[in-house]
Image (tube, coloured by chain):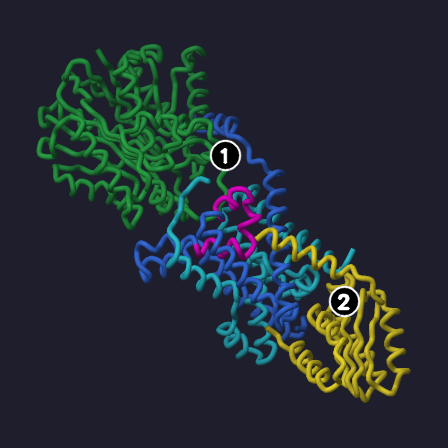
Chain colours: A yellow, B blue, C cyan, D green
Amino acid sequence: MWKAIMTLSLLLILAGCNDREKVVSYALTDNVQNQQEIEKLLKEDDAIEQANLLVIEDELFVAMQLKPFEKWNRQKIEQDWKKKLEDKFSGSKVNVSADFKMFWESTKLMEEKDQKKMLKELHALKKLAKEET
Amino acid sequence: MKEQQYNSLKDQITPKTPLAINCLKAFAVGGLICCVGQAISFFYMMFFDFTEKTVGNPTVATMVFLAMLLTGFGQYRKLGQFAGAGSAVPVTGFGNAVVSAAIEGKTEGLVLGVGSNMFKLAGSVILFGVVSAFFVTLIKLILVSVGVAAW
Amino acid sequence: MSTIGFTFLVAFIVGGLICLIGQLLMDVAKLTPGHTLSILVVVGAILDGLNLYESLINFAGAGATIPITSFGNSLTHGAMAEAEKHGWIGLLTGMFEVTSSGISAAILFGFIAALIFKPKGKVD
Amino acid sequence: MVIVFQSKPSILSSGVVVGPLEKRSVFQTYFDKISADERFQKVSNEKGNAMLISEACQTILKKSNLNNLDIDYLLGGDLVNQMTPTNFAARELAVSFIGLFSACATSVSSIVIASLLTELGASNYSIAGASSQHNSVERQFRYPVDYGGQKPATAQWTVTAAGFVLVGKHQPKLPYVEAATIGKVIDYGATDPFHMGGAMAPAAFDTIQAHLKKRSQTVKDYDVIMTGDLGKIGLKILIAMFAQSGVKKEDLSRFRDAGAEFYGEDTAFLAGASGAGCSAAVYSGYMMEQFKSGRYKRVLLVATGALLSPLSFQQGETIPCTAHAIEIGMG
């Protein structure tokens, strides 16, 4: 059992070590400016370690991983960002999450090419994020 | 020999509790158990539909399951002797308390033995958990009602 | 260090520290394990009342959900959520809805273990 | 109170049956039977305890070519609720029976009563002794056996053992009971159930002092003064008490403890062995053999008992302790 745990934790550590941009975005929208602006904002925030940005039609989905000591204020950071983005892009449905699950799934999602399927999965994620227990 | 005299003699001869070593062991083993829990959490989040908010329940249940196996095979007792609070404070310790009492009650049957012995050790944890939940909520509700605090 | 690696480190340290406090209660204050665990559960409930325990879980993950203090937290959390929604009635209804997966899991697995295992009493 | 036996009842035979873990005891060659299963294939640990007693009594009957109709009295006890294992074993043996409880001191108190009955002429053959079974006793007094609690270095391991002796009229070339002291109940306010040695040492000290004084003896008159289950730390405390009371340093080595020696230097057992079966097995197995081989001429056996119950402990009572002594001689 210990061997399995060790292997798993090693894998996890390695998985987190890959070199990637701080903000990765995936957009299926005409408004490229919006996307770039949000990317810039996310990059400027020191509390964020990494973030995924998905812009599909009117959906605006941000999944982020906070720096360890910023996690204390997770709820507040999420709310602040949601408010910030809603003010800026009033027409969009904004979702912000600092949950590991959201980050993990959105990273996988960005490799998906089929737009319909992607939207479906995104809705499933949004539903999951609302679950309390 | 007077009682006081005797007790000072007894204290002199009785070996002292190795506090530093006990604390170190408790810290290390307790930390490791939490790391196992963290690995299980990641497992559930990566392969099942659990978020950081909801992963606590399946993780705790899995840890209790592991505690059951270790208790049943007589390993948790040894871990407990080594780690002290390091294995007692995590939920696995709670699981061990319930499971060991349940196993022991087996000879008196499922109702009189297992059923009524199960919470011999762990019952107080549930009692104080529920009672303190009630009073904390009550106090908070009063504070919110008079406007001193917010939810 | 990677985020995930750091998560393990934080879980180790926070979980270890809670256990260390437990050891001090047992060795310095000379409390029985039953007293120690009861105190820690009450502390968890109070910390949740102060809205601190959720933050601790955000920060430390399993380092905060695995120690017994999380029982107090999850029980109080259920009661408080109901009270927030329904006020005074919620205080009562919430009390009967509170759950902790650890308790149900321990009951179920304890029963299964009783069916399978015998008490050992071996020294090693 | 000291009793001097004029008729010098003899210890005719002995039977010691132990559990599987006791194979690791330094005294294991003196045990008649080592069972591979502490439950003797029975369903419960308590039944296993009863089997220990039955087997020990059967061993005695076999060794001395008697059957149960020849036995006048069975005297004994154990540590489980109301001594049910001994009661059940007595049902099997079908002889007149009195159950005794002096906790771990039952091993000696039973021999004292048997000797008194013999002295009275009421008994030709009496079986006396005590037993304990680890799992059933731990469960009764402390935690479930699989519970992962941390025991301190002063904690002792309850043995799975039954030790019984056959007491009869005086016969030459056999060890005999010369005198006995029934101890008082001494309580120095100890409350720690994981430090029984420290709680019981004052009782052992008091009984030994009383016995030596009334008999006008000194420690030197004995080859060995062996206490029951004070454990390694309890024995150290007892020796320190006698050192303070003026016993010479070279005589202090005459103090030994069955519990401290039972498992040798094995640290897995912490401060050593305990339980009614511990002193009973060592006294009736090892000690009787030492007399037969001529190594010892006179010993004082002092079994100590902590008279607590789980209830009294939980209600915050202190631990009252007692110690009973018998003086055994030969030749």
Kindly identify which chain the residue marked by label 2 belongs to: A
Residue C17 position in % (x across, y down): 65, 50
Q: Which residue is mark 2?
A: A65
Number of numbered callouts drawn = 2
Residue A4 position in % (x across, y down): 61, 55
Residue D276 position in % (x across, y down): 31, 34
**Magenta span includes B95:** yes
Is C78 left, or right, of A71 in this rendering? left
Q: Which residue is mark 1?
A: D153
The N terminus of chain B is located in which quarter?
top left
Is D288 left, or right, of B23 in this rendering? left
Which class describes the residues within 10 Å of circle 2: few (<14), some (14-19), or many (20+)?
many
> What separation in Å lies between label 1 and label 2 (alpha carbons)?
48 Å
Q: Quadrant of residue A108?
A: bottom right
Secondary structure beneath disc 2? strand
Q: Identify the amino acid type marked 1.
A: Ala
Secondary structure beneath disc 1? loop
Residue D14 tag number: none
Q: Relative to residue B120, is residue D68 depicted above or below?
A: above
Q: Which residues are magenta?
A: B76-99
Kindly identify which chain the residue marked by label 1 belongs to: D
Residue D55 position in % (x across, y down): 23, 36
Whether residue B46 is visible, yes or no, is yes
**Magenta span includes D73:** no
Identify which residue is drawn at 59% across, 69% down. C77
Quick one: D126 or A61, which is closer to the camera? A61
Q: Identify the amino acid type marked 2.
A: Gln
